[in-house]
Image: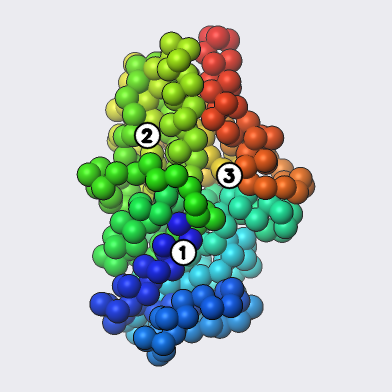
Amino acid sequence: MRKTCLDMIHRLALTDSRVVYVGSDPSAGTLKQMAKDVPDRFIIEGIAEANLIGMAAGMAMDGLMPFVHTIATFLTRRCYEQVAIDVCLHDLPVRLVGNGGGLVYAPLGPTHTAIDDLALFSALPGMAVVACSDADEMVRLMQASLSWPGPLYIRLGKGGDPVISKEENGFAIGRAIPMRKGSDVLLVSTGVMTGRALAAAEILEADGIGCAVLHAHTVKPFDGEQTVALAQGKRLVVSVEEHSRIGGLGAAVLDALAASGPVPPTLRLALPDSFVHQYGSQDALLERFGLQPEGIAASITQAIRKR
């Protein structure tokens, strides 16, 4: 997914003169070919994220479409005021590419785990927030990004995730994609958690629990209409995300349900409201917090039995 996103910036730059890559301390050799093909639109700014955002905002004001790329925690925390005032206040078409969303950088500890990025950027007026499920869907998002009028945050996984998206389902920012039908439970997921949600649904199916899966790649603007429609008649509505339970996808699901009338029984599966002090792989920590398929299925089964 990560490589696909960056390669798409290069591809888009070859056909759209507005596209600029602005990186902050990327790995050596990142987009090396783009630097050769369009050197005037390939910029490595350095480790100064607030300045990075100011540069990008100025470019956007001059008609360019900068894709700002750095580690997600640095992009969402270190320059929050600049994103709010320089980019969102002016409703500029800056694309903020957050590398390593969620627990990708868990081996580096709590300073690098982006577990609050969806909540932080969803709070900004005008900001769209998207987390793709796989590399194929990333291609469709990047193509759609050219026509999106305002600021856009793109949460990147580490890559190598199984491809679960389908081209025939289409892609539009703000429109969730039904991935699976089921009569008992609606499971709403985002990003790479959708693959795990689908696997959990298979486990539940074997136990006689029909689980529909809705892939909400766009956390904001959230597709409340489809969520509410699919929630009708379900015994339980579940949100699952690689993010703090504060803000994020779960909050968007509950807001949509509350706005439509009485809220059905709900379950929010997410990371706890704390820093992740454990070190380890992304998969190991997802397992620890019950966010792998077996853990998701077990939590849903337990919630249904309690009712």
Q: Which residue is mark 2?
A: 214
Could you say where residue 300 lies in the image, as x and y percent from the top left?
A: 53, 20
- Amino acid type at circle 1 is Lys
Q: Residue at x 25, y 77 (%)?
A: 15
User: Which quadrant is the N terminus positioned in?
Assistant: bottom left
Of labels 1 and 3, earlier in sequence is 1
On screen, residue 83 versus residue 284, left or right, reads left
- Amino acid type at circle 2 is Leu
Verify CB contact (< 8 Å) between mark 2 and mark 1: no
On screen, residue 73 versus residue 209, left or right, reads right
- Amino acid type at circle 3 is His
Kindly give the residue lying farthest to the bottom in the view shown.
40
Q: Is residue 134 above or below residue 75?
A: above
Badge 1, how many Cα within 10 Å: few under 14, some, many 20+? some
Q: Which residue is mark 1?
A: 3
Q: Which residue is mark 3?
A: 243
Q: Nearer the viewer, mark 1 or mark 3?
A: 1
Badge 3, how many Cα within 10 Å: few under 14, some, many 20+? many
Q: Nearer the viewer, residue 212 or 229?
A: 212
Per the image, label 1 sits on a secondary structure element best described as helix
Q: Residue at x 44, y 44 (%)?
A: 162
Q: Nearer the viewer, mark 2 or mark 1?
A: 1
Q: Is residue 86 above or below residue 5?
A: below
